[in-house]
Structures are given as structure tokens and as C-alpha cells.
Image: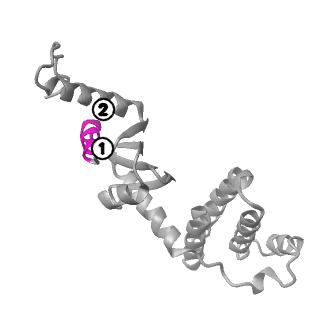
Amino acid sequence: MRALDRAIEKVGHDIENLKFNTAIAELMSLANWLRDSASKMSNAEWNHARRIIVLLLAPIEPFLTEELWSLFGEPESVHRQRWPASDPAALADWVARRVATGAWRYRARVTVFAPAAAVSERIGPYVGTVTAVSSESCTLDTGSDSLATMAVYLGFLGWDFRVDAPPELAVEVRALAERYQRALPGQSGSRPALSRP
């Protein structure tokens, strides 16, 4: 629930700096996330999330939040509650993901057929983010300014992988594989025209 942690930090910072318009914008974004994510949450996650959003809204909408708080069955005023604390690890993970994928012209997601821990050791946190799928596979979200460069670096991982997105990267990987195949002794076939220098 990184969205909650991000909102706690952002809304708190904005209110402290009297930037109520950006605090409200973040709360609207959080409300949209909550609406879209509600069906995927457990009851405990849902109750935690709705409690957080009401606490964040309380300095801006005191009467509405007091009413909502009482509907939740809370005995004390919403305004007597502590400001929610964010999870620093979740924030660090969110920032790393944004840095890892935000600065590149091309972004990609690949499934790597290796344990997440092994892939994480091979790449740095600013190269991409690794998420375990099973004990023997993971997804890698990464990017590059060139699809050809990304195709080569994915080969450097040393494990089998599947390109999930974008389709243009799959085309680059296929072209690279064909080039490597033609480089082997005894391989025949016509050499295609170069698409770039």
C-alpha cells in the first residue's frame, strides 16, 4: 500500500507548508486509488486505508471527517488522533521504482527465469526493480535510452527471460538472436541490410 505511505508524507508536508491545494490534489489521487483498489484489499487493509484517508483529510475538512470518524465507530474525536506514520521502507521502494524507470526513453518489463534474490544481486536498485513471481522466476522493470542496448544488457543477465512489454523490445531481442545465430561457424543465410550503423 505504497500509495498510503506516499500520501501520508506528501499531505503532511503540504499542510505544514500551507500548500492546501496540492494536499487536496494528493487526497483526491488517494481517494481514486482507494476506489480502484478496494476490491483487491482484505477487510483489514480496507479499514486501515479508509482510516488513513480520514485522518489526512481532517485538518482540511474538520466537520465531515468528524462525522465519518464517528460512523467508523471510533469513540474519540478524529482531531485527538495522532498523525499517521508512513513506512520508510515502502517509501524507499517507491522512490527506487520511480528512479529506476522514470529517467529512460524506453521502459520494459521482462520475466526472468531465475530467483528474484539472484537477479537483484546482479543488478543495482537504480537499474531496475525486481519482483518475485515464484521461487524460480521474477519480473524485472527496467529501462534504457535504446532498445538495442536494453536487448544486449538483458542477455548479460545470464538467465532465460521473456519480454512482456514493450513489443518493440521483443523485435530487438529477436533481431539480436538472429544476428548471433548467423555469427556461428557453418551458419548460412543471407545477411539482412543493416537497420542502423
Total numbered badges shown on the rendered structure: 2
Residue occupying the point 69% across, 84% down: 82
Q: Is residue 123 visible?
A: no
**76 versus 190 height, above or below:** below
Dot 1 and dot 2 residues touching (CB under 8 Å) = yes
Residue occupying the point 74% across, 63% down: 46
Q: Position of residue 157 (x, y in %)?
A: 29, 48
On the image, numbered disc 1 is attached to which residue?
A: 154
Helix, strand or loop at mark 1: helix
On the image, numbered disc 2 is attached to which residue?
A: 173
Q: Position of residue 75 (x, y in %)?
A: 87, 83
Quadrant of residue 10 within the rendered picture:
bottom right
Residue 146 part of the magenta segment: yes
**82 versus 152 height, above or below:** below
61 relative position to 17: left or right? right
Q: Nearer the viewer, residue 113 or 11?
A: 113
149 relative position to 18: left or right? left
Q: Is residue 157 visible?
A: yes
Amino acid type of the residue that numbered disc 1 sits on in the rendered structure: Leu
Q: Nearer the viewer, residue 49 or 158?
A: 158
Q: Position of residue 145 (x, y in %)?
A: 28, 43
The local crowd at label 1, few if under 14, some if 14 to 19, many if 20 or more residues have their Cα within 10 Å, is some
Residues in magenta, as a range: 145-156
Helix, strand or loop at mark 2: helix
Q: Position of residue 78 (x, y in %)?
A: 79, 80
Residue 139 part of the magenta segment: no
